[in-house]
Image (tube, rainbow, N blue to C red):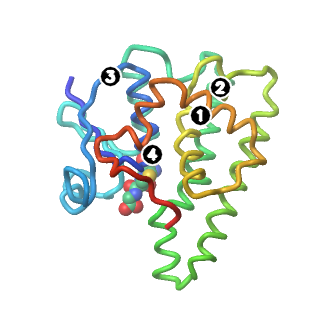
Amino acid sequence: MNLKLYSRYRNSAGQRVRTALNIKGMEYEYIGVGADGAISKEDYREINPQGLIPTLVIDGEMVTQSTALIEFIEERFEGPSLFPEDPIARARSRAFGQVIACEMHAVGVGRIRRHLHEAHDMPKDEVRRWYEHWLHDGYTTLEALLRRRSASLPFCYDEKPTIGDLYLVPQLFNSRMFEIDLSAYPLLCEIYERCIALPEFDKAMPENQPDFPGELDGWR
Ligand SMILES: N[C@@H](CCC(=O)N[C@@H](CS)C(=O)NCC(=O)O)C(=O)O
């Protein structure tokens, strides 16, 4: 099977998919999108009309949206499951990931921040306040959800990383890069450290991608 992943080193939705492929032990071709990547943003729109990354091309068939891709990877490939076996833990791990994808990432991603500034004249410090509000709202929820678990587990909802952990790591990585104060979320930070010590997560980190320019940007 031929797998091509269109992503970018700092593509947090793509990082979820890279980690899922690594856990399943799947090899894939990485294609960086953007000025410093292998394909320009304009040409990439021919592949994904939404222009967002990631896109996975499976034997010539393209699929978008990281959540759909992770479900596909689970259904299609052998290897460790990306979901807890217990149905309640499975639903909770999915829900944990969706708090990040829908209530944090989607409202603070770069194009939303740029649109607030450029189309609605919101000053940059106000945009940062917007961003931080939704981020802390989400992190507070996530930390509280984990504190309510009945058992103490090394990862979010299992003895191994599952879908919730795949979403947590890129989100926390971004927050660290943007110098967000994470001191109120010790459980999230602990799980993050445990995840990034694993080779499947490490290989998916921004600095280990072929298009990593050598240093990380800060807030923008
Ligand atoms: N819901 C999408 C989100 C994809 C997304 O927002 N990707 C961002 C980077 S993390 C992107 O393509 N940014 C480029 C842009 O906004 O132009 C998914 O889960 O795949």
Q: CA distance from mark 2 to mark 3?
A: 22 Å
Mark 4, residue position? 13
Query: On the image, numbered disc 2 is attached to which residue?
Result: 155
Quarter holding the N terminus is top left
Q: Is residue 214 left or right of residue 90?
A: left
Residue 51 vs 94, above or below: the answer is below
| Residue, far front | 214
Q: Tag 1 or tag 3, which sits nearer the N-term? A: 3
Residue bearing the label numbered 1: 164
**Residue located at (56% from left, 77% from top):** 124
- For label 1, the SS is helix
Q: Residue at x 56, y 61 (%)?
A: 107
Please tell me the numbered disc located at residue 26.
3
* x then y, percent, for residue 50: 33, 58
Q: Is mark 1 within 8 Å of ligand 1?
A: no
Q: From the viewer's perspective, is residue 49 above or below residue 201?
A: below
Choose between 21 and 213: the one closer to the eye: 213
Ligand 1 is within 8 Å of the C-beta of the residue at disc 4: yes
Location of ligand 1 given as a quarter of the image: bottom left
Q: What is the CA distance from the residue labelled 4 to the residue labelled 3? A: 18 Å
Sequence-first disc among 1 and 2: 2
Q: Is mark 2 within 8 Å of ligand 1?
A: no
